Amino acid sequence: MKGQHIGYIRVSSSLQNTERQLADVTLDRVFTDKVSGKDINRPELANCLNHLRDGDVLHVHSIDRLARNLKDLQHLIEQLTGRGVSVKFYKEHLNFEAANTSPMQTLMLQMLGAFAEFEPSLIKERQREGIAAAKAHGKKLGAPAKLTAEQAAEIKAKIEAGEEKSAVAKAYGISRPTLYKLLAA
């Protein structure tokens, strides 16, 4: 009996587009997660894993869509191929079949999986370096202040005089949490 062709698609947020992943692949069913790939506890991944049967092929756009952690990636591949499920990664041109996985494929999986795991930490490091460099050059980070120093003093005086906080916040076009932060400062 020939198995099904199942797709697994993942993006990190609901605002990201899933259309580019597996767009040209004919699939019997697709499971899509719109969550971080930092671990394998994802609802649609769990549904996908439960759905897969011996003889099925799992199609995934790239290794980092399935797992961002080498340990999780290896575990998933071993689990799936052990159940007779083949896994196909398109971007990396890698196929893993239960009876036909070569040592070279395993090495490539480990190397590419390590890069997928390493990439987010590099991005965070570059981000931290960029923030530090901007601060060193005197750049102000974050949103601009909503109020001038004079407006902040006026607000504090009005609240001390007994004016209602919600009315003062509304008059200055700020939220109540912003008002409370101002009063606490």
Image (cartoon, helix red, strand yellow):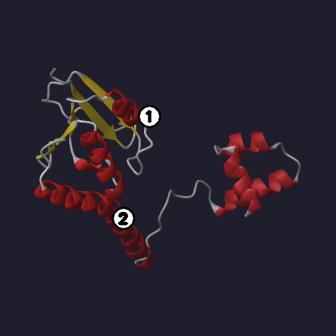
**Callout 2, which amino acid?**
Ser
Report the number of discs.
2
Residue designated by label 1: 43
- Mark number, residue 10: none
Circle 1 or circle 2, nearest the eye: 1
Q: Position of residue 55 (x, y in %)?
A: 20, 29
**Callout 1, which amino acid?**
Pro
SS label for mark 1: helix
Q: Nearer the viewer, residue 58 or 54?
A: 54
Q: Position of residue 123 (x, y in %)?
A: 33, 63
Q: Nearer the viewer, residue 8 or 157?
A: 8
Residue designated by label 2: 121
Residue at 13%, 58% (x, y): give it: 103
Q: CA distance from mark 1 to mark 2?
A: 25 Å
Image quadrant holding the C terminus, namely: bottom right
Residue at 40%, 77% (x, y): give it: 137
Q: Position of residue 115 (x, y in %)?
A: 25, 61
Res. 20 image quadrant: top left
Residue at 31%, 51% (x, y): give it: 73
